[in-house]
Amino acid sequence: MDIKQQWNAFLTDATEEEQQVASLYLKSLERKRSGSNGTHIGALMEINSEFQEPDTLTMTIPNTELLQNSLDILHGGLTATLLDSAMGTLAFKLIPDDKAAVTTEMKVNYVAKGVGDHFTCVASVIHKGSKLLVMEGKVYRSDGVLIAHATGSFFVIPKRI
């Protein structure tokens, strides 16, 4: 069965909720294809980034069925992904163009449940060295309540072109 047949077979028996989730998947593929998001995970999470000079980054994601766990709250692993993405993106922006930054360590504290319309992660720099950057990230839900706090270390490596 090819992908069109699989898709049509799925939609034939899909519930309304399954159709809504399938639509979210398709929209994420469109965002990736158009370049709105550079990665599939960024497109799936609908990440929107904004830099505040000199060393702060804000990432916002909407709350969708794709991001929730079985308790209907933001999945902890996706909260960590948002934190890692925001801190890593900021680290990458702060290093020379011929370098890349990779996560070497991350510690996350979850302090409140992830509910609401959207989530905002604010990443900032704690330390910027030539070989290691240490970042901080905080995720807030739409009512302004902090749901998670993290620190992360990012090793600076040569970028392969």
Image: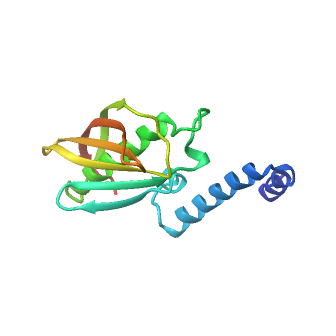
Q: Residue at x 58, y 59 (%)?
A: 28
Count numbered badges in the picture.
Answer: 0
Placement of the C terminus among the 4 image quadrants: bottom left
- Who is closer to the viewer here, 23 or 65? 65
Asked whether, in this view, residue 19 is left or right of residue 161, the answer is right
Within the image, what quadrant is residue 130 found in? top left
| Farthest bottom residue in view | 34
Residue 87 at what x, y percent from top left?
Answer: 30, 46
As drawn, is 86 to the left or to the right of 153?
A: right
Q: Quadrant of residue 47?
A: bottom left
Q: Which percent across, then down, holds residue 43? A: 51, 57
> Does 80 sit left or right of 3 as displayed?
left
Q: Residue at x 49, y 47 (%)?
A: 116
Q: Which residue is drawn at 50% across and 42% down?
A: 115
In this view, the residue farthest toward the front is 143
Residue 141, x across and y down, in percent: 42, 46
Foreground: 51 or 120? Answer: 120
User: Where 27 sits versus 77, above or below?
Assistant: below
Q: What residue is rendered at 52% in x and 50% in y?
A: 63
Front residue of 58 and 97:
58
Q: In the figure, 10 relative to 28: above or below?
A: above
